[in-house]
Image (spheres, rainbow, N blue to C red):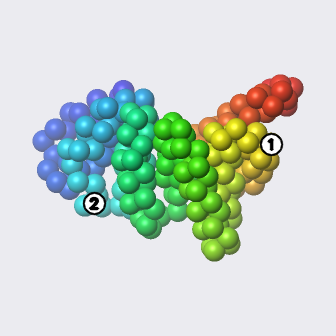
Amino acid sequence: DAALSLVDRTTGAEPPERHCFDAFRCVAAAALGYPHAARALARSFDASPLPDHLERRLTAWAVTVACGEAGAAAEAVAVANAAYPIPVRAFIVISDAHINALLLAGDTAGAQEVAQMMRGRAMASRSTPFGQIADAVTGLAELGGGHLDQACTNLSTALQRVTAWNTATGFRYRYEILLTTALAMRGHTHDAL
């Protein structure tokens, strides 16, 4: 709230600074669970002139999350697909939101396709972060599809291999909750604790 209050006091900013503040408001609304506000904010500015790749990627994440939570799966998919080429190693935010939007819409096959795409990128890049991301989002897709054994395996592997995740982002925590959920659904309550 304090950060939003500070940003709201800068209403006189002109582009490109204004776009940065609008992007911040959009990301905050999506992260705080206000998908309709995030979508409205996203429609009020053009994210393409944002001065940083990460800002564009996070704004795309916010819009993908907001669309998914608002039931606009097709729009969420379009935003996610447009964001993958943005050159920054934050693919987990887009693929996570993309898969989550598809799962919220009941499209488990589509979620599996996105996970497969991320596994393909991991194989092509042979980069540790991509492998971790592929394991994590594959676990998410498998959990959403009811494939609990595979979800537990991939989520456990991702969490054991995590080296590149900044703990401040909350993604490690998110995936720990997903693993706990999958373990509990399998009846492994002792391991879930």
Name the image quarter holding the N terminus: top left
Q: Secondary structure at mark 1?
A: helix
Residue 188: give x, y in percent of width and height.
85, 29
The correct choice, above or below, for 10 with respect to 139 in the image is above
Q: Is residue 165 something that shows in the picture? A: no
Which one is closest to the eye, mark 2 or mark 1? 1
Image position of 68 (left or right of 20): right
Which callout, 2 or 1, points at the residue further toward the start of the chain?
2
Q: Which residue position holds label 1?
A: 149
Q: Quadrant of residue 170?
A: top right
Q: Write the residue at 74% across / 34% down.
A: 182
Q: Is residue 91 something that shows in the picture? A: yes
Name the image quarter holding the C terminus: top right
Residue 159: give x, y in percent of width and height.
73, 47
Residue 138: give x, y in percent of width and height.
66, 51
The disc labelled 2 sits on which kind of residue? Ser
Residue nearest the observer in this picture, 140 or 89: 140
The disc labelled 1 sits on which kind of residue? Asp
Q: Which residue position holds label 2?
A: 48
The correct choice, above or below, for 58 with respect to 147 in the image is below
Q: Mark number for residue 17?
A: none
